[in-house]
């Protein structure tokens, strides 16, 4: 029944034309399924003679040289030691060990259970299955850790370490090929996973081209993997309502396959389809201000790295690099550099699974010229304003006034309209909850996406949009920046969203102040209709990754040597922390610092029940001292004047 409900909700995101096309496409699965059941699969690696393929011959580099962060690599290798090279790797926060046992590719790192090895479309991989989180299991089978082995091989001075790294790469690569025949098991349910595996495998063996371990069976297996995966991707390219970061990865995988192995049947088509579709999707998914259509910073990084890899590869092979790809790569890279700041630390806005286009050591985004620091940057299409302290570029306030995410499913967006994230000196004080897991505890998945998990106002216990499944939203909201002004001393931003329109409530948030004297956040909840007054439950959350102590009319937050003072009015204050909960109960007081991880934090909850209009006022000052009352009143007067002006759009 649950499966039927999911399919019904998924169908609602599709157009009639897409439903027809998908229905017809199901017939295309029948042939491969019958061949699979009858044991008539494709020939194995032995059918691929390496001498047929230019990529498999020692000679000039077949892939472009890439910028690597070798200092981080050396630090991580030193910390992991020999144990790391024996096959112990993180699988998104969970332990994973190959250890010579091919079964490891099918064992769920989060539960220890085994994924079935039947025909890929029969594998129950969606959230709520009884086996584990598919995203965690995908991670080692992306084979991106082979790139790490290859970088160790390239850079290590110790001959024993070099040999051990190349041998680990050889054994694991051949093991994966043997244990995962085409169309069998979990690792074929996603075309994107196949694409990332092709990209990683090609780069790994390019870097180890001269290693004694790179013998004929490696090259035959590489040709086999590329041929089978590219053909599979081409048949199952994510389009229509499924188009997103998966499509970008799949297209780049097709470009790699088409250029690296032009001798394969279908290579010219893979290159053409991959390049043309990538141009189309890059234009759509990387907005004009450089932000991402999915409203998820980590996935924005993912696709910008992939587009950058495609540009370098096309240029390396003498192919024309479409202008649209160059421009998307540059504007996306610039956006990420600005938002990440000098610490290269992206706030965990929207979903983020900790995955990479190729390797955590790839330095493609941060290389080259850096954008100059500005006190205020606004990204109108993405819907973010970033305030930066002119005295300290690592002190930043991010204001989210953008949309929910990418239509029609909005899958990686969170209900975080008008939320704030505050960072001081690289330490996050007012934090975003992160993602937790896609297929783990459903309650925590729901909570981390919810409005209550973000630094904004919740009305009547609702989210700003309706969660239908772990990756589908309905009734999306619209966010809008209404005003951005400043005088000699005070900066003012005003925005709104309509996510509570069904409840008859409009939420406006104004921010006014400066870094020296502090900031005032004014939340105003009002009814745009002329109906009879109706009482509403209003709940303002401030999620603090810091120790909190009451301090007069406010609270003092301390993290290491950084202090922050908050004065909050407009309701009854309750302070919650996950470490006083019984077990791990999804709700305020918890956050996910990385995929698969949870940690207790402190959440300030300000509650009010009554008629509208109603306002919450939060005065924020870094340094631990309260905001001066005269400064609060001046900020409040400026915000009130702007809110009540007749030329502000969307006001009665």
Image: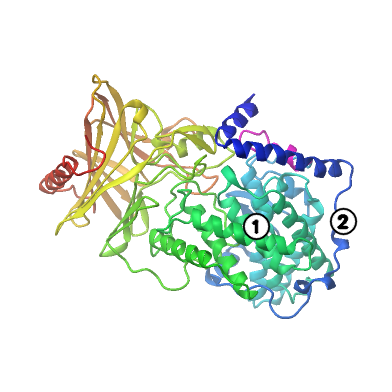
Question: In terms of secondary structure, what is the magenta stretch mainly?
Answer: loop
Q: CA distance from mark 2 to mark 1?
A: 22 Å
Q: Above or below — where is 194 with respect to 433?
A: below
Residue 532: image quadrant is top left
Identify the residue under disc 2.
43
Say how the picture is coloured.
rainbow
The quadrant of the rendering that contains the C terminus is top left
The quadrant of the rendering that contains the N terminus is top right
Q: Position of residue 85 (x, y in %)?
A: 68, 63
Specify the segment rendered in magenta.
Answer: 119-131
Q: Position of residue 166 (x, y in %)?
A: 73, 69
Residue 530 among those drawn in magenta: no
Outermost residue toward the front? 17
Query: Looking at the image, which residue is at 72% across and 50% down?
Result: 235
Among the two numbered marks 2 and 1 on one chain, the one whose residue lies closer to the N terminus: 2
Q: Tell me if I can see residue 200 in this picture.
A: no
Query: Looking at the image, which residue is at 44% across and 39% down?
Result: 590
Q: Secondary structure at mark 2?
A: loop
Q: Judge by depth and name the residue closer to the eye, 57 or 579.
A: 57
Q: Secondary structure at mark 1?
A: helix
Identify the residue under disc 1.
196
What is the crowding at mark 2: few (fewer than 14 residues within 10 Å), some, or many (at least 20)?
few
């Amino acid at each position: 029944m649950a499966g039927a409900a999911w399919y019904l909700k998924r169908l609602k995101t599709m157009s009639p034309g897409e439903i027809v096309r998908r229905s017809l496409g199901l017939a295309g699965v029948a042939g491969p399924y019958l061949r699979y059941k009858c044991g008539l699969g494709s020939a194995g690696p032995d059918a691929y003679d390496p001498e047929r393929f230019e990529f498999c011959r020692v000679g000039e580099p077949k892939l472009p040289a890439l910028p690597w962060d070798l200092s981080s690599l050396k630090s991580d290798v030193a910390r992991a030691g020999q144990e790391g090279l024996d096959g112990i790797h993180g699988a998104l926060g969970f332990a994973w060990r190959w250890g010579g046992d091919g079964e490891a590719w099918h064992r769920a790192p989060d539960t220890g259970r085994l994924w079935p090895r039947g025909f890929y479309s029969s594998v129950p991989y969606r959230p709520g299955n009884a086996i584990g989180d598919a995203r965690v299991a995908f991670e080692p089978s992306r084979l991106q850790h082979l790139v790490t082995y290859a970088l160790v091989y390239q850079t290590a001075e110790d001959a024993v370490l070099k040999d051990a790294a190349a041998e680990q790469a050889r054994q694991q690569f051949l093991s994966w090929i043997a244990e995962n025949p085409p169309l069998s098991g979990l690792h074929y349910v996603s075309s994107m996973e196949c694409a990332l595996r092709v990209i990683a495998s090609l780069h790994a063996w390019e870097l180890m081209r001269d290693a004694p371990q790179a013998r004929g069976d490696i090259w035959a297996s590489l040709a086999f993997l590329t041929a089978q995966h590219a053909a599979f991707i081409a048949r199952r390219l994510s389009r229509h309502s499924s188009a997103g970061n998966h499509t970008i990865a799949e297209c780049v995988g097709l470009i790699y396959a088409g250029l690296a192995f032009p001798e394969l049947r279908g290579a010219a088509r893979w290159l053409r389809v991959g390049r043309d579709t990538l141009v189309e999707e890059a234009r759509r998914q990387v907005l004009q201000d450089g932000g991402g259509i999915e409203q998820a910073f980590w996935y924005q990084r993912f696709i910008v790295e992939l587009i950058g890899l495609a540009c370098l590869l096309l240029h390396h092979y003498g192919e024309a690099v479409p202008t649209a790809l160059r421009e998307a790569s540059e504007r996306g890279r610039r956006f990420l550099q600005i938002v990440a700041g000098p610490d290269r630390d992206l706030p965990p806005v929207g979903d983020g699974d900790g995955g990479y286009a190729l390797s955590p050591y790839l330095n493609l985004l941060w290389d080259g010229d850096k954008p100059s620091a500005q006190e205020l940057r606004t990204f109108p299409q993405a819907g973010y304003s970033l305030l930066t302290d002119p005295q300290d570029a690592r002190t930043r306030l991010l204001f989210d006034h953008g949309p929910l995410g990418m239509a029609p499913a909005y899958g990686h967006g969170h209900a975080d309209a008008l939320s704030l994230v505050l960072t001081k000196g690289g330490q996050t004080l007012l934090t975003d909850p992160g993602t937790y897991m896609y297929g783990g505890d459903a309650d925590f998945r729901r909570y981390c996406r919810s409005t209550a998990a973000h630094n904004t106002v919740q009305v009547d216990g609702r989210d700003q949009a309706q969660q239908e499944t772990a990756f589908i939203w309905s009734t999306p909201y619209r966010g809008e920046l209404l005003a951005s002004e400043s005088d000699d001393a005070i900066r003012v931003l005003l925005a709104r969203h309509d996510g509570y329109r069904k409840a008859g409530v409009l939420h406006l948030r104004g921010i006014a102040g400066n870094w020296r004297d502090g900031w005032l956040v004014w939340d105003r909840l009002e009814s745009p209709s002329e109906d009879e007054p109706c009482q509403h439950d209003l709940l303002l959350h401030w999620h603090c990754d810091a120790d909190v102590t009451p301090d007069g009319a406010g609270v003092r937050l301390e993290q290491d040597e950084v202090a922050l003072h908050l004065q909050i009015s407009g309701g009854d204050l309750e302070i919650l922390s996950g470490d006083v909960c019984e077990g791990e109960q999804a709700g305020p007081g918890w956050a996910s610092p990385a995929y698969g991880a949870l940690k207790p934090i402190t959440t300030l909850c300000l509650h009010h029940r009554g008629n509208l209009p109603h306002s919450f006022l939060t005065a924020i000052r870094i340094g631990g001292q309260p905001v001066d009352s005269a400064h609060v009143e001046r900020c409040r007067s400026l915000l009130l004047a702007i809110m009540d002006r007749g030329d502000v759009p969307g006001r009665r």
